[in-house]
Amino acid sequence: MLNVKTSEQARDIICSSFKDSIPGFEAVEIEDCLGRILYEDIRCGEPVPGFDRSTVDGYAVAASSTFGCSDSMPAILKQTAEVIMGQETPAQIDADSCAYVPTGGHIPFGANAMVMIEHTEDYGDGTLGILRPCAPGSNIIFKGDDVKKGTVVFRRGTRLSCAEIGVLAALGQARVKVFKRPRVAVISTGDELADVRSKLLAGQIRDVNGYVLCSSLEAIGCEPVHSGIIKDDAGDLLGSVRLACESSDLVLISGGSSVGVKDAVFQTIDALGEVFFHGISIKPGKPTICGKVGSVPVFGLPGHPLAAYFIFDIFVRPLLFSLMGACDARRPSIAVLDTAIPSNHGREECVPVKIYGDEGDLCCSPVFIKSGLISALSSTHGYIRIPRDCEGLSKGEPVKITLY
Amino acid sequence: MLNVKTSEQARDIICSSFKDSIPGFEAVEIEDCLGRILYEDIRCGEPVPGFDRSTVDGYAVAASSTFGCSDSMPAILKQTAEVIMGQETPAQIDADSCAYVPTGGHIPFGANAMVMIEHTEDYGDGTLGILRPCAPGSNIIFKGDDVKKGTVVFRRGTRLSCAEIGVLAALGQARVKVFKRPRVAVISTGDELADVRSKLLAGQIRDVNGYVLCSSLEAIGCEPVHSGIIKDDAGDLLGSVRLACESSDLVLISGGSSVGVKDAVFQTIDALGEVFFHGISIKPGKPTICGKVGSVPVFGLPGHPLAAYFIFDIFVRPLLFSLMGACDARRPSIAVLDTAIPSNHGREECVPVKIYGDEGDLCCSPVFIKSGLISALSSTHGYIRIPRDCEGLSKGEPVKITLY
């Protein structure tokens, strides 16, 4: 007898049961932090830029010395030493002087505006004509304009994409604390399973879940540990799960499809720790088990690849994101359903769909498949979830699609 | 003088100039192929499943022997040996017999349907009552139902996500040929640049482009080689670019912002190979250079991080995807512009935007920023491209956003 929970109940139990299971942090170099999630707030330790910089090639001036000038009546200023790129300038500007500054160069003391070179005339005698007036602050990025010293630039939990990595570089942050990648053991059970590298004997099928789950884990930034195939033997399973729980942050057991094996997974978790629930009112994926061994979350997933994938995606993936201190930023796509889907009679249902059409005008077709077909996963783009109290979906209805 | 091209011209030149630059293939193990792109078609060498399988726990029968039975008038069949999971069964079924088969088990010769155990009654004397008639094919996945032998399952150019990896596992494909990851050298030029690990001297700013470009390359599956900072010296640059071209599949040089350096990058590419264009009519990003040294594409990107990122994203990224034999599957998001953007006077313009609101009802705000501010990249979500012949965008207009 399964003690079946609704999706919402299952989610709530998962949310509340694993608060103390966070794997902790590690420090990584900036070159290795793509996709990692910050464990610490990042505060700006040096203003960016660190000095007033020109955004044009031209002349640094005191803006007031250009007021009222024009093509016909240039402001005549004395040229002082050029500013050299990458060096602090010793030059000082007053009402009668100016200095050449290249784009990105240091604005000399006393100047508060840059005149573009196109708006000047070099008389060749050490003086320069300014042909257009400029306002204070023109063509300058001031010290700290990009990031002020002391600002909290990124909060704990920020996922580091190339934009954030660029800002870390600008701030001189070569090493940051990030959440450890959860180490997740993946065990496949079943006497009928053969590994991808084995000779396939009569009556055997290949283990698919091990590879789908490991690559799904890798894709979201976890560290999968492929523990391989365990035969339907209570003793073997107990040993493998115990070992996995000692060396991992989370354990996934998929399969087997026979009644005996389902009991073995349940009994194994129950013997080593605690089972929170056995069974979710969802199709496919009903025979799901969730429990804990020590502080390690352990899931028993269905043996059918599609069901195992859906249960992983809906229930385990959000938990892994929360163990990594992050939110799952995946946004659903909206598409118009091109075929009605009948009522699912009181069980939540996941239906794989194909998407077609252009952005802003997307359509989708539900794909109804025999249980256990793995090709369905690669020939569709995502899935829709039909709530258990829904009386079916109509043709033409917009639906939310979770993309793989 | 720049020989400025429109975006379309630049794209066409890039498309047609690097057809012979594909880095080739390598064979990788299934554990290492997430995100890689197939170099070969994958054909099904063994049917999936390899035998007729039950999808339920129950009894294998000849369907015709159940026709007309009911609760009150069961069909009485003799039970032969149980089918053992993962083994071929020697049992043979005829019109008078049946065999127990667990979910996933091998259907014995002579049977063509499975009766669920719930619809049977075991009399304990070696006979079984079938309580409901079943149609031929009921509750069976037939040999090759999932994938038929000889089918081309994936075409060259397919990106391997977890779904495809699952199918490869099911097919017994432990090793596949994939496009080599393009090795891309990233060089930053500029006397004003300091690396993230250096002490920042007065007048210096930190190199941002090196880190943004390397992580962007990594994110799309290329192999970045960070060549560091080269000072504004024609000889140094020539040596570095020559070396990079010898050991990489593509070379990116960013910066510097001074006139002198722009010339040096142009002259370097021109000296070592050929320059196709110098300047794109796009804002930001005008001073972009595209050329070739041997068969190696070489790009001179602007020094400003935001401009360098946009040019990389718009022009280099599609080329890298095509060198990897793939399409860029990124779909734009559609959102409603909440602020009008004035005309851009004959130059294409990229404007970073913040996105807010719910899926299906997204809005976006343009963010206007001083040139060169890196924080703009991390505080926005993507950018819109305003074509050069567009007279500005109105408030309330739906726009396409390329997400970072």
Image (spheres, coloured by chain):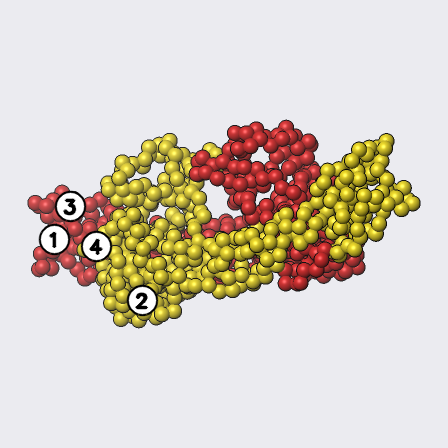
Chain colours: A red, B yellow
Give, as a three-letter code, the residue at label 3: Arg
Q: Could you give the CA–CA distance between mark 2 and mark 4, rounded to whole angstroms?
A: 23 Å
A56 or A259: which is nearer to us? A259
Q: Have a look at marks 3 and 1 and say if they share a chain.
A: yes
Which quadrant of the view contains residue B402? top left
Which quadrant of the view contains residue A214? bottom right
Q: Nearer the viewer, mark 4 or mark 3?
A: 4
Residue at figure coordinates x 63%, y 47% from the top left:
B145
A370 relative to B276, above or below: above
Of the numbered discs 3 and 1, the one sitting upstream in the chain is 1
Q: Nearer the viewer, mark 1 or mark 2?
A: 2
Residue A121 tag number: 1
Q: Which residue is mark 3?
A: A132
Circle 3 crowding by C-alpha within 10 Å: few under 14, some 14–19, many from 20 = many
Say if residue A248 shows up in the picture. no
Q: Which residue is mark 4?
A: B2
Q: Secondary structure at mark 2?
A: loop
Q: Have a look at marks 1 and 4 and say if they share a chain.
A: no
Can you give x and y, in whole percent of width and height, for residue A223 in the image? 59, 58
Q: Could you give the CA–CA distance between mark 1 and mark 2, rounded to whole angstroms?
A: 43 Å
B163 or A103: which is nearer to us? B163
Residue at figure coordinates x 80%, y 46% from the top left:
B94
Circle 2 crowding by C-alpha within 10 Å: few under 14, some 14–19, many from 20 = few
Circle 4 crowding by C-alpha within 10 Å: few under 14, some 14–19, many from 20 = few
